[in-house]
């Protein structure tokens, strides 16, 4: 009889705690993974380059500038690959944000280079 009572109590505890654990564990993991890590430092590249080394001289609107030529080239290549309008715009926007469309850009925090 005592074993049955103990089993019933344990089952009730498990039945009440299991759903809480299923919710609580992922929430705690998300909190732990998204917390600000003070050991990570964002770096800003303050170096400048000349126009013949792949810098982003010119404007997006001027098709004869370095940047304008890169945008046209990228758009044409992705059109040839079957991409359209918004997709090409998003790709160019990401490239602009990541490296100002500089094919010789270097990430000082890692091994990634170029566009």
Image (tube, rainbow, N blue to C red):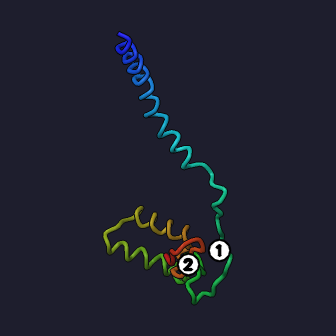
Residue pictured at 42% horizontal, 29% vertical = 18
Give the number of the disc on residue 105.
2
Label 1's element? loop
Give the number of the disc on residue 45.
1
Q: Is residue 104 above or below residue 28?
A: below
Q: Position of residue 38 (x, y in %)?
A: 66, 56
Question: Marks 2/1: CA distance?
Answer: 9 Å
Q: Position of residue 57 (x, y in %)?
A: 60, 81
Residue pictured at 38% horizontal, 21% vertical = 11
Q: Is residue 48 left or right of residue 30?
A: right
Q: Is residue 56 above or below residue 1?
A: below
Give the number of the disc on residue 75.
none
Q: Is 96 in front, or is 30?
A: 30
Residue pictured at 63% horizontal, 84% vertical = 49
Q: Is residue 76 left or right of residue 106?
A: left
Q: Quadrant of residue 43?
A: bottom right
């Amino acid at each position: 009889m005592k074993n049955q009572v103990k089993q019933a109590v344990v089952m009730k505890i498990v039945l009440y705690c299991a759903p809480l654990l299923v919710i609580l564990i992922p929430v705690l993991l998300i909190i732990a993974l998204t917390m600000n890590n003070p050991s990570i430092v964002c770096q800003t590249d303050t170096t400048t380059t000349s126009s013949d080394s792949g810098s982003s001289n010119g404007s997006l609107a001027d098709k004869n500038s370095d940047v304008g030529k890169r945008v046209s080239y990228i758009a044409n290549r992705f059109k040839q690959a079957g991409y359209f309008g918004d997709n090409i715009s998003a790709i160019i926007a990401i490239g602009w944000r990541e490296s100002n469309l500089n094919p010789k850009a270097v990430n000082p925090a890692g091994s990634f280079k170029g566009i």
